[in-house]
Image (tube, rainbow, N blue to C red):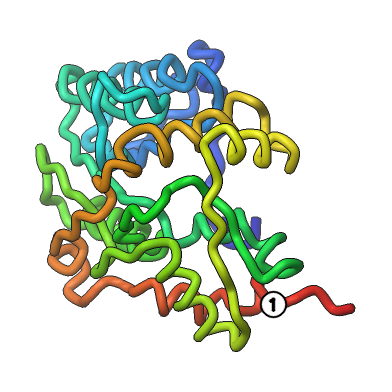
């Protein structure tokens, strides 16, 4: 990974907690991005326990908007438990709850390129899509500033758009008409499985977007947390669409 050139790599396996203590040797601060896999609640807990044993001075945990133990979504419930585990660990921490990523559109790149359309099961729900580049800059600022202990930030983009409106923004940036096709949750899960996603992941995407927090409109909230952390307005979805236009260009015939 060229982006990691110059970084010191420490290997550890969160499914094997006995490998983690060595990975934390000499580490002072941690950015905890929970693994995406079945049982990642246990992996997350193992990482927090290892950080506690190592005497880590500060953990920044990536979480999500809408976390709750009552949500059907694995992600939203596991993030909630991870926040509680971190709070109870005694480690100084900061939690960043991110909204739905602008870069999630890249999961739909194949059909955008070949069909000029993308699919999901969100209806007319609105999303304040947040750019992952802004999240990265905000986390770097938190980790290097020596402040923010005990704080929880909700990171969102500046405007809440429906997926039909996202399609309009993509159309403007790409110079061709892009449309959004709404599916039922079952149709969306089946489509994702057919595209090669594991069954558990296909179900998770359908649950989080169709049955739970986001379909109810929870993703429409906007905050000024990113602007305060970055000292500038966050990127808009239009910025994402323009900057990633090459990756969504049509397939040459």
Answer with left or right where residue 74 lies relative to residue 225.
right
Residue 62 appears at what percent x and percent y? 33, 41
Furthest toward the right, the residue is: 253
Answer with left or right where residue 77 lies relative to residue 88.
right
The answer to whether residue 56 shows anywhere in this view is: yes
Residue 150 appears at what percent x and percent y? 10, 37
Image quarter in which the N terminus is found: bottom right
Answer with left or right where residue 99 lies relative to residue 94.
right
Which residue is labeled 1 in the image? 249
The answer to whether residue 29 shows anywhere in this view is: no
Depth check: give the residue in front, 97 or 43.
Answer: 97
Q: Residues within 10 Å of mark 1 (few under 14, many from 20)?
A: some
Residue 18 appears at what percent x and percent y? 51, 11
Depth check: give the residue in front, 125 or 151.
Answer: 125
Depth check: give the residue in front, 166 or 149.
Answer: 166
Image quarter in which the C terminus is found: bottom right
User: Compared to 77, does 28 lie above or below?
Assistant: below
Residue 120 appears at what percent x and percent y? 53, 49
User: Compared to 211, does 107 lie above or below?
Assistant: below
Secondary-structure class at tag 1: loop
Residue at 34% of width from left, 74% of height from top? 236
Residue at 49% of width from left, 60% of height from top? 103
Residue at 49% of width from left, 13% of height from top? 17
Rendering quarter of residue 90: top left
- Number of numbered labels in the structure image: 1
Residue at 41% of width from left, 55% of height from top? 101
Answer with left or right where residue 230 lies relative to residue 248.
left
């Amino acid at each position: 990974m060229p982006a990691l050139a110059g970084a010191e790599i420490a290997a550890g396996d969160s499914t094997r907690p006995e490998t983690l203590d060595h990975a934390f040797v000499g580490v002072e601060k941690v950015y905890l991005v929970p693994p995406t896999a079945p049982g990642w609640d246990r992996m997350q807990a193992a990482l927090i326990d290892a950080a506690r044993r190592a005497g880590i001075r500060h953990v920044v945990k990536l979480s999500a908007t809408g976390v709750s133990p009552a949500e059907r979504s694995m992600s939203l419930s596991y993030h909630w438990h991870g926040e509680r585990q971190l709070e109870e660990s005694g480690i100084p921490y900061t939690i960043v709850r991110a909204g739905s990523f602008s870069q999630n559109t890249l999961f739909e790149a194949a059909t955008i390129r070949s069909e000029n359309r993308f699919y999901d099961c969100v209806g007319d729900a609105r999303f304040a899509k947040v750019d992952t580049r802004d999240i990265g800059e905000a986390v770097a600022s938190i980790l290097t500033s020596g402040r923010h202990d005990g704080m929880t930030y909700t990171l969102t983009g500046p405007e809440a758009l429906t997926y039909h409106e996202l399609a309009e923004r993509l159309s403007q940036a790409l110079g061709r008409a892009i449309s959004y096709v709404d599916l039922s949750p079952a149709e969306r899960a089946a489509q994702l499985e057919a595209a090669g996603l594991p069954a558990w992941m296909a179900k998770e995407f359908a649950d989080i977007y169709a049955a739970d927090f986001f379909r109810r409109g929870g993703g429409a909230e906007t905050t000024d947390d990113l602007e305060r952390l970055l000292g500038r307005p966050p990127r808009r979805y239009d910025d994402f669409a323009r900057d990633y236009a090459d990756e969504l260009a049509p397939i040459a015939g």
